[in-house]
Amino acid sequence: MEGFDEDVHYSYITRLRADNRLPDRRTREADGTNQESSQPPFAYWATATLFNILRLPPDNGAILNKLRDSRNLWFTPPDPWHRTDNFNVYFHGGVGEELFAPPEIVTGDRVGRLLSLAFGVLAVIGAYGAAREVFRRESWTLVATAIFAFTPQMLHISAVISNDASAVAFATLTIWQALVVLRHGATSRRLLLIGLLLGLAGLSKVNALLILPGVALALLINWRTRRLPLRQLIATGLLVVLPFVVVFGPWVAYGIVTYQSPLGLETHSAFENPNLPPPTIPQFLGALVPVYMSYWGKLGNGGTWMNPIVYVLFTGLVGLSLLGYATFLFSRRHPRLTPLTVQQALILLIIAMALFAGLMQWLLRLFAIYLAIHGRLMYPAHAAVAILLTGGLYLLDCFLRGRYTQILRLYAVGLPMTAGLLIAPLAIYATYAPPIILTRQQLPALQGTPIDFDHTVRLLGYTQSNPFIHEDSLHTITLCWEILQPTKRIGAYSVKVLDVGDVVAIRTSVLGLGHYDLGIWKPGDIFCDAVDIALDKPLAAGQTYDVLVNLIDWKATTLDGTALDLPRIAQVISPAGDMRSTVNETWQNTTIEFPGFADLEGVAINGSLAAGQTLRLDFLWAVKGQTTNNWSQFIHLVGPQNSVVLADKIPGAGRYPTWAWSSGEKVVDQWQIAVPPDLPPGDYTIQIGFYRQDTGERVLVTQDGKSAPDSAATVFKFKVK
């Protein structure tokens, strides 16, 4: 049930069969119908009737309601284009799998999808009929029909249980009949049919009624061009309204009487708080981008995007069509359009604009909750959009005098066919495909120390392309796991980036990134999760962060059984870059160099360099090369009688070790030191250096081009009297 809201649509059907009445909107959370509880009932009634005709076993909804217990609550992929998580709403296999075992759910889902497919076929027939009314050439009629039928979103609407398929079907048939009226006139039978189809469209989904302005305009134009009397216009309206009211009216009356709501919008969360802030203009314009892309294809419940190039190509198709209209308006080389063609174009444009206006109103209302909405809400006008697109291509072809007819048609038909029949299925497969089980020989070179979780799952180690992290970007770390023994538990885990206990970024998922959960693994299975972590909080320049991995509600231990409260697996680096702008200092130049690593480009002192004083020393390092060593830096006070350790620590207050420094960086390192108050009189020097933690050996340093004695360079001198 990975179709958009497919589970709640199915719950509506189940409740309709079990209770033989519409769902109670006040108990929508309890019966699983949620926001769909107020949707018009036709699509659900048709599916429930089909279930009864086929004598599918009844389901009182008790099993389906339990599906919430097996939802993937840890699904948080931060990258819509290169994600590795799947979009399963529910787990398949292991815990919760028994919820899918009853055949009535599996069979019902498939039967319901077949009915959606039938509505999709009906919609294609309507689109062909509408296009045939507009285009005199069969070839262009087929182009418009192909754009309508093979758009990935149209295929998806026709492939899952929802009320979109029937709404699109009846709206498209209504558009077809409205265009027939323009060409052939309005007979009583056709007007009654239009009212019936319009009522069925509204009884499927309320937004389908937004085609009404275009249909009304078609009837008005027919009355005006045929110079009919006013009574004929009134009769026309009555013949359309009568079947519409008979079909759609009872549901509206039911809503008013029962819930004081004729359209049932109150079940959507946006209407629970009417004072939600509207988006700003930049936010609104930004939200239009996913709305536009989702019109062409956003698949699955979580929203699987196709390759970005596909959306660029669809935009190219739109651009060519607009270019065709531009040539018609601004060039003399264009075909003469009959008044009928202009009227048809106007009707289709009004229908498309009305659906778009409704979409924008919905976006403004829901923005504070959902940030963007789905372009499929415009699909009752999809036939109008497809015909208008094709019309622009036809005009462009006329302007080009037919020299590129085959290329234009191939592009217009080949793009949606390739996207809908090939690219979209591949995108869905990549999203829902089972994981790849590896052998030990296929494992990458891993870093880190293995960690066991309840002696059931072992984290073998990790890899990352580089340890550097940046704000407003993704960091990918690949975690490789081994199953030690079978389990029925959910393997939900978190990956956290920590700054001294504060969470900078967190990413949650499930072992295998949701490509079937832990219950199906067998002992010895090895797999790797490429986990993307979104870093959307400010990062300090020149600092390392700890990376922790924790299986939720599992106990982490080392291989010898030692408990790990904080299973840290790695450290990542926020590069220093050029830190000179972070401080306001007047730097004193030095000639101190650590060959092959860094030059001490400048020093600054804040405070008085005297006995008993506390002061701050700032060092400006120009990094020349990288080291894998974690060197400690020392600051010594050397006097006439002895040497005093003023500081000895990892640079960056312990947060930016030397192994993290990168060539080209300008690292500002600040140290707070306290000069002893009881210094005997004499000459003193402050010396610095690095030493290796593993051996205690000091790192070679030069000053004035010569090796510094005892590998300690002098940065300051002062006298105590």
Image: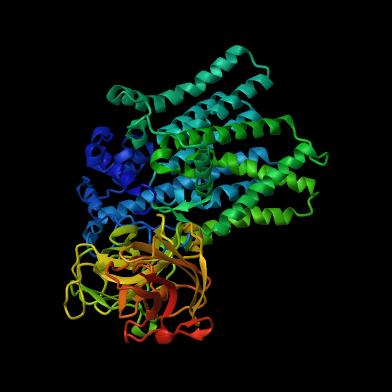
Is 131 left, or right, of 490 in this rendering? right
User: In the figure, 15 relative to 317: above or below?
Assistant: above
Could you tell me if residue 717 is visible in this image?
yes
Specify the quadrant of the image occupied by residue 207: top left
Is 470 left, or right, of 15 in this rendering? right
Instruction: Report the front residue among 86 and 38.
Output: 86
Residue at left offset 41%, top offset 75%:
658
User: In the figure, 75 relative to 717: above or below?
Assistant: above
The residue positioned farthest toward the front in the image shown = 721
User: In the figure, 96 relative to 477: above or below?
Assistant: above
Could you tell me if residue 432 is visible in this image?
no
User: In the figure, 323 relative to 418: above or below?
Assistant: above
Q: Position of residue 702 (x, y in %)?
A: 49, 83
Instruction: Report the front residue among 293 and 99.
Output: 293
Count of labels in the image: 0
Q: Position of residue 142 (x, y in %)?
A: 63, 49
Is 337 left, or right, of 114 in this rendering? right
Quarter of the C terminus within the rendering:
bottom left
Specify the quadrant of the image occupied by residue 136: top right
Coloring scheme used: rainbow
Q: Position of residue 465 (x, y in %)?
A: 45, 73
Residue at left offset 49%, top offset 41%:
283
